[in-house]
Amino acid sequence: MDDFGVYAVFGVNSPPQRLLCTSGSCRVSLAVPPAARQVVLFSSGPWGERICVNADLNDADRIPITIGKLTPYNKCLSWEQWEEETWTDGVTLTVTLEGGNLVKADWSEPELMLAMKEYTPKDAMAPPAPRELNGKRKRERTAEEEEDVEKAARRGEQEDNVRPNGAVEKTTPVRKVRGQGRGGQRLFASEGDAAKTTAAAADGAGEAQGIVGRTPPHSTTRTKGRQAKTPTQAAPLVSPSGRWGQTMCPIDAQTAILIGGQGARMQFCKDPMWKLCTEDLSWVAAETLAEGPTPEARIGHTAVYDPDSKRIFVFGGSKNKKWFNDVHILDTQSWKWTMVEAQGKVPPLAYHSCSLFRGELFVLGGVFPCPNPEPDGCSDSLYIFDPHLSIWYQPIVTGDKLSPRSGHSACVMQERKIYVFGGWDFPVCYNDMYMLDLGLMEFSAVKTTGKAPSPRSWHGSAVLSDTKFLIHGGYNGNNALNDTFIFDTDTNSWTEVTHPELSVPRAGHSIITMETGRPRPSAEEEDGDEGAGRTGRCLLMFGGGDNEGDFYSDLTTVSVEELLREM
């Protein structure tokens, strides 16, 4: 007998309420009692052919507050009100079952608004009934009305988008949304912060270019490919939704894994994990493929792959007012997640860098919450995690001391040096370069030649060869950038390069280099058939946000050989 069910607990003193069962509806929506400050959702019974249960908490205007997903390997979710600034009265919980014995009609049926007292035991107090379906809910806006609202909001923001020197920036500003600034650093300045920044710049206090404000690009609300405004989608996605702040790392010659990120309406993506096959550049949703406790949705985390142990290490990040210092490991052979109970101390960090050297994780910088849960400042510390002993430690580091920062990049070159570039620490963006000698454990400031990138954070970086790495895009405190630079570690020189595929402004995107089955042909290959279709090493770029508040969901490929020829 199939006794599968999905249950919710509202508050610490309430009994479980059954929301979904084998013979019931596949989609249910009900009101969260005003007195409830915590919601726990869990499944019970065999999953069978069921794939997942999508869960949405929506405010009184049907705008998502947060989302989550139950799977056969992740059978419990919990939310607390203090984590969500927009959690007020009138919150509804919507759960939708995917897979199993669903038929097409199940997806078209109206949502069932349950009165919780149907499942409340007699000895428990019945919570207030949910809002009725007809006549009680606010009318939802049409697509045209949404566009009008967005345009009006952007017009209202135009006067605030001002550089520190007072000049108005001629770009499409980012409109404000409810709950703006949650979940990490705030980068666009408020009016008070902008005034302070402008005054500091006028006094000559900001010698570094690109004074930054306080609100990150992830506070924007529109994606390049608009998704349906219904709580769930009937058709499964065939590629990742638009997002920023995700991670992407190769695990073999033909496969890369994408994890996490944040997209439209400041919501953490419902499709947090994807597998990319570079042979044909196809995507496969991978969240339900892995067993064990999956990492909680997050942004500003890092994910690195160890080819010796064939494991991915995910560390840190933030989710709204939650900050993480946990380590999750995905074994890519068994496809099983484990969470490490590590010894030693490491603070919760987001927007840090994480580099792999001789099987250990080198975590540098990042923003941390102090006092919790608001971000207080950036770190300049180096922490090392030893997976064999499951312990964190801080090494003794000598040499030049780099400034605290977050949103910087770090590239391991020739298995003996880490090059750190850029980042920011309010109110300054950086474009300096530091090198950590992994043999001597000594930092040194790198004196560079050539045209250097302007100050920026949240840029993309990738190693192109033994002596060259690339910097692309990023955020300078006012705008997303679209320029590209290559650094040569032999000559310590910068070279700016141009490519049509790298001309779009992006910040918070991911860049990796891999072999692909369909690289962009060279000029010689375009003129003739010889060599056409040959595999080659390519730059793969995904995600990120632009100056209009959109998030990219396309995968861009650029031949590494072409870029190196531009130098």
Image (cartoon, helix red, strand yellow):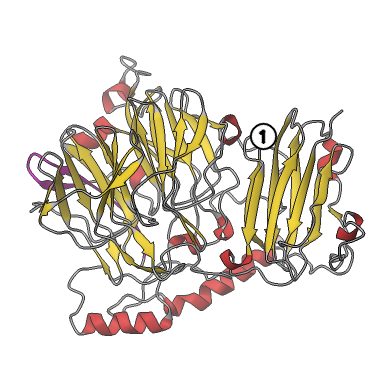
What's the magenta region?
A: 479-495
Residue 500 visible in image:
no
422 to 415, vertically: above or below: below
Asked if residue 441 lies in the magenta stretch, the reply is no
Q: From what the image shows, is residue 404 above or below residue 556?
A: below
Q: Which residue is mark 1?
A: 72
- Report the residue at 16% width, 53% height from top: 433
* Left or right side of 241 for 204: left
In the shown orientation, is residue 185 left or right of residue 200?
right
Give the residue displayed 88% in from the left and 68% down from the top.
135
Q: Amino acid at mark 1?
A: Pro
Classify residue 234 as left or right of residue 253.
right
Residue 72's image quarter?
A: top right
Query: Can you give x and y, in whole percent of width and height, for residue 54 in the image?
Result: 69, 46
Secondary structure mostly seen in magenta is strand
Q: Residue at x 50, y 46 (%)?
A: 260
Q: Quadrant of the C terminus?
A: top left
Asked if the magenta segment contains residue 489, the reply would be yes
Residue 263 visible somewhere in the drawing: yes
Label 1: which secondary element: loop
Q: Quadrant of residue 563?
A: top left
Position of residue 338 measured from the top left corner of the image (x, y, whole percent): 49, 36
